[in-house]
Image: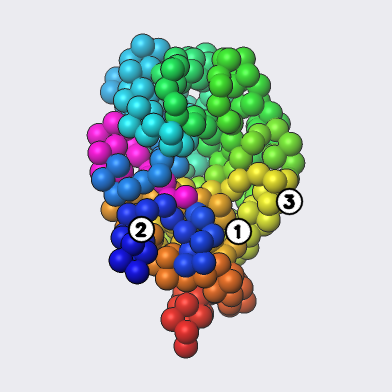
Amino acid sequence: ERKAALSAASGPGATSDGHKVPLLANVGGPADVSAAVAAGAEGVGLFRTEFLFLEDSAQTPTVQRQTEAYREVLQAFPEGRVVVRVLDAGADKPLDFLTPADEPNPALGVRGLRTLVDHPEVLHEQLTALARAAEGLPVYLEVMAPMVADRADARAFADACRAADLTAKFGAMVEIPSAALRARALLQEVEFLSLGTNDLAQYAFAADRQVGAVSRLQDPWQPALLDLVALSAESAMAEGKSCGVCGEAASDPLLACVLTGLGVTSLSMGASALPYVRATLAKHTLAQCERAAAAARATDSAEEARAAAHAVLSGE
Ligand code: PEP
Ligand code: MG
């Protein structure tokens, strides 16, 4: 019993009946790595790489500078998985030298992968730096693109990865409803999906993530958002591929159980949330998580969804 309690406190993520759900950390640079390791993260599910590009507002970081920074993170997780997101510039993360200054709606403009399609040399350098950083390390490197809208986007990213001779799995983030609706088509081009629920909520509800007045619509418990998660996870399952969550939704322990019940295969979050998510997941079976997910989806509001999931998981 003591052993079970200990593994629930620090071991790999799993439901009480042993269904494994790898618990990964979101990191924004090498400075976040020690907290992720201390929290027992099984790897990194979202390595945001914007920090490097914010160091100098006039130019992109050199390949050498990037290689050093990526290597610092990769070597912290020997035998672990590290999912690196290529540069996500624009909208809430503008970069002077890459982001067009004259867009009326930057969130709907050239951002994420679109920026990299317009600046292929930036993407190629980043992928080259990643290939060099991973050389000789026993890490499982995965690379994903932000803001993939359709199959052509997924193919463009996969082509760029192949052109850079990168030995890694490549994937697409699902942050735009069109990507969730056509997840199976994206998976003809890439090997995994990762749900960015912050942007997915923003685009599904037409609610700017930076505008507090519409925060009600940014609530990840919204049943429509749960539907998009379910569709993505079921599509991945049908293709025999994985579909994780790396948005804020994964850091809510109750919602983490619901996401597991929807079929999500890994959860990535800020390190501080990891122990709570691990402990809550370890208290429930996969079947209970599935019932909680179904109950949440059967409601018409975020509040009702939360209450319905809570009722199922607390045995009310
Ligand atoms: C997201 O959109 O959910 C996500 C993980 O990416 P970011 O918050 O960096 O846009
Ligand atoms: Mg995003």
Query: For the point 45% across and 16% down, which residue is it?
Result: 135
Residues under numbered marks 1 and 3 in contact, where contact means CB atoms less than 8 Å apart: no
Mark 2 residue crowding within 10 angstroms, few (<14) / some (14–19) / many (20+): some
Query: Mark 3 or mark 1, which is nearer the start of the sequence?
Result: 3
Task: Give the quarter of the figure containing the N terminus.
Answer: bottom left
Q: Which residue is mark 2?
A: 7
Q: Is residue 93 left or right of residue 220?
A: left
- Report, in whole angstroms, how far the alpha carbon at label 1 lies from the one at label 3: 11 Å
* Label 3: which secondary element: helix
- Report, in whole angstroms, how far the alpha carbon at label 2 lies from the one at label 1: 23 Å
Residue 208: tell me if it is visible.
Answer: no
Q: Which residue is mark 3?
A: 238
Q: How is the image coloured?
A: rainbow
Residue 150 rendering spot, x and y as whole percentages: 68, 38
State the extent of the magenta-drawn residues as a range: 22-36
Mark 1 residue crowding within 10 angstroms, few (<14) / some (14–19) / many (20+): many
Q: Which residue is mark 1?
A: 263
User: In the rendered view, would you say 61 is above or below 240?
Assistant: above
The label number, if any, that marks residue 65 in the structure image: none
User: In the rendered view, would you say 64 is above or below 21?
Assistant: above
* Label 1: which secondary element: loop
Residue 34 rendering spot, x and y as whole percentages: 25, 39
Q: Is residue 31 magenta?
A: yes
Q: Is residue 141 left or right of residue 72?
A: right
User: Which amino acid type is marked by label 1?
Assistant: Gly
Q: Ligand 1 closer than 8 Å to the CB at disc 1?
A: no
Residue 230 rendering spot, x and y as whole percentages: 63, 60
